[in-house]
Image: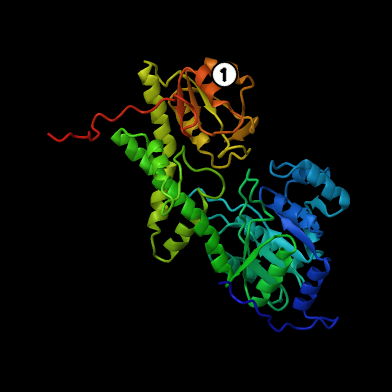
Amino acid sequence: MSPTVTSEASPSTASGQSPREKALARIASGQATMAIVGMGYVGLPLATVFAQAGLRVIGLDVSPERMDQLNAGESYIEDVPSALVAELVEAGTLRGTTDFDVLAEVDAISICVPTPLGKTRDPDISYIAAVCEQIGPRIRPGQTVVLESTTYPGTTREVILPVLEASGLKAGEDFFLAFSPERVDPGREDFTTKNTPKVMGGMTPACAEVATALYQTAIDTVVPVSSPEAAEMVKLLENTFRSVNIGLVNEVLLMCDKLGLNAWEVIEAAATKPFGYMKFTPGPGLGGHCIPIDPLYLSWKMKSLNYTARFIDLASEVNTAMPEFWVERVQDALNGEQKAVNGARVLVLGIAYKRDIQDVRESPALDIMRLLEKKGAHVEYHDPHVPSFVEDGVPMESVQDLDAALAAADIVVVVTDHSVYDWDDVAAKAELVVDTRHVVPGAHQPAPDPKAAQPTTAG
């Protein structure tokens, strides 16, 4: 049951309205304006949804190239059509800028900046902190600030609140602060930013009331929770759930490999149970900005409280080891043909972290390519969604002629199962295939472990 959102008394403004009343009135009248800081995979879709709802939206990003594209009516995110961006820009409801002074003009600010892990696997909230330092001197009565960047429980209260209240204004009375976790799933068409329920945790009941009213103008369903910490934990639970279950099914693959069993046959049969089971499938490892990273935010936070998040740590250990497992399978397959990895021509099919998107962040394909190159393989890739990218300062390009590349490769490694691929054609043209996604008919399967337990017959 959602908590009841109640109003708090607020000081009156010169017009006789309290900041809360003024904010709610502007939202209700459709006059509210909004700045979205960080116009990437989360920010751009959010900006278009609010602009479509009739708000005047200003996208703010440190990349002049991105903002130039936006103002030219061009999208740089696959999920957002350029035609939509052009329509909104032409209507005057969406524009881009790199000037932080616009923050003083708007009624609401949504923070959608990256939250990566540092080299020591600790949370890096430097982008959030930098944005708050820009908002602090510009914040004014009646403004609403919503953090959407995934982070550990306590960030909104411990990091953002002190910076904003250093202005002399008070959250819940003069301005309104909340956390609402992004739930973007790139490439998905059934659930989008607009129709995916939005969790909202306000710093105070008044903060929750104003932020909920704001997001209800553009999002179909807003789900209030009792605090920013609860909302922060919701996001981490969602992705920890996926990480742990993917880790479990990846370990099932490893166990079936030892037992000489086909893991996919076992999983498909288990999935016929109509209750008490949710199907997950094994693969090359975790990718994207959420599932490999978000649970480690929670693990880090718990370590500060002298608690070990055992499921998270174990799942991370299993999932991050999967590229090594598949490289071993490549080596086994080549050995079976009396070929060495050293000097072999390897074609990796798909380097985006999941099907039908262009995002390569944290993609296990990059680890597989790196490991194969260390073993002396000549590695190329093909991905219709990623024509080129830069990894560790080294530019790479997708092969142009897929048919020729399939024929020339000693072995093909399927990492991302893009729907555009004809898997029967891949099977027919490739000399040897290792398939991490179980989509290619007749792909190389590991030989049963000779030490595996064999069934016995009754005598």
The amino acid type of the residue labelled 1 equals: Ala
Residue at (87, 48) in percent of width and height: 90
**Left-right relation of 60 to 400:** right
Write down the residue under mark 1.
405
In the picture, the quarter occupied by the N terminus is: bottom right
Residue at 73 percent across and 51 percent down: it is 61
Is 166 left, or right, of 353 in this rendering?
Answer: right
Q: Is residue 209 left or right of residue 277?
A: right
| Residue 300 is at least partly visible in this image | yes
Helix, strand, or loop for circle 1?
Answer: helix
On the image, the x and y values in percent for residue 438 come to 46, 33
> Which of these two is toward me, 14 or 245?
245
Q: 61 and 205: which one is in front?
A: 205
Crowding at dot 1, Cα within 10 Å, few <14 / some 14-19 / many 20+, comes out as: many
Colouring of the image: rainbow
Residue 315: x and y, percent? Answer: 41, 49
Q: Is residue 120 above or below residue 338?
A: below
Q: Give whichever of 153, 260 is nearer the camera.
A: 260
